[in-house]
Amino acid sequence: MKRLIALTPLLIAAAPANPPVVIEGRQAAEASPLLLNSIAELRTVCGERQDVAMQLACVSWLNGASQINARFRSLSPQLLPDFCPPAEGLPLGRQRDVLLAWLAANPKERLDPSLVGYRKAMAASFPCRAGA
Amino acid sequence: MTAPLRPVLAVAALLLAQPAAAQTSEAQTSAAQPADNPVAMATGAHLKAMCSRQDDRASRIICLSWLGGASQGHGWFAPNDPGQTPEFCPPSQTFDLAAYRAIILAWLERHPAGLAMPSIEVYSRALAARYPCRKG
């Protein structure tokens, strides 16, 4: 419980998160791992199986990122590829599993922004067909 | 026992949740998504329910983490339909999730119809109202 209580203010004080994913990635990574700015933080937080605060942070972050994918298109598809979820849906738990598998297979990208890892992981498993 | 249990249940609900707005059309989202599961963050009502609860740890984490996931790539994406999810142009590339939360809650107070909208539309409309992009 103590940890849960301690982590929440970090999110709230949450200091500036980082919009342009590449430009300021490292700077904000110093703030809190719960901000999920880097792939390394994404791996730590989403790989957590005990800490409830981390689990909530992971799946809620995935939820926000996936909703953006549904309504927006990438202006930089090589860096942040779009992905196309299967028709039956893509539950957040599955997104987390896909993401963790990709992160494990691509350890060299750990310092990149978390959104880059997320988009690449999803696009690798759920690519959009040409013309989609 | 109750206090630690609630966040656990929220995690379970999230893991089972279909991220509504991500996978369904707007009409499907409005019609089919459960109004009783605000952790799904599918509608404006869900945003309000989670983001206005300063007294609940799980709600604060869900709200701010969702905003973080939605915001992180800002500037690197273009809306498919700017009428529904307009672009916004904050004065600085450095933004504050707590400020975004306040802007969205204030917008929902002024636009109660937003409670029935998909959450990503509320997010975009609220921030575009606060930070409009100049044409040209």
Image (cartoon, coloured by chain):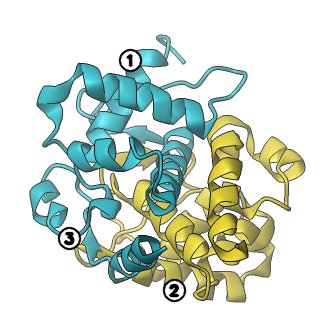
Chain colours: A cyan, B yellow
The three-letter code of the residue at mark 3 reads Ala
Q: Quadrant of residue B88?
A: bottom left
Residue labelled with disc 2: B102
| Position of B67 relative to B55 (above/below) | above
* Quadrant including the C terminus of chain B: bottom left
Q: Residue at x 63, y 20 (%)?
A: A86
Find the distance from the CA under tag 2 to the CA under tag 1: 36 Å
Front label number (3 vs 2): 3
Give residue A31's mark.
3
Q: Nearer the viewer, residue A2 or B117?
A: A2
Q: Are marks 2 and 1 on the same chain?
A: no
Find the distance from the CA under tag 3 to the CA under tag 1: 30 Å
Q: Are marks 3 and 1 on the same chain?
A: yes
Give residue B126's mark.
none
Q: Whole-percent x and y of residue A83?
A: 46, 26
Residue labelled with disc 1: A124
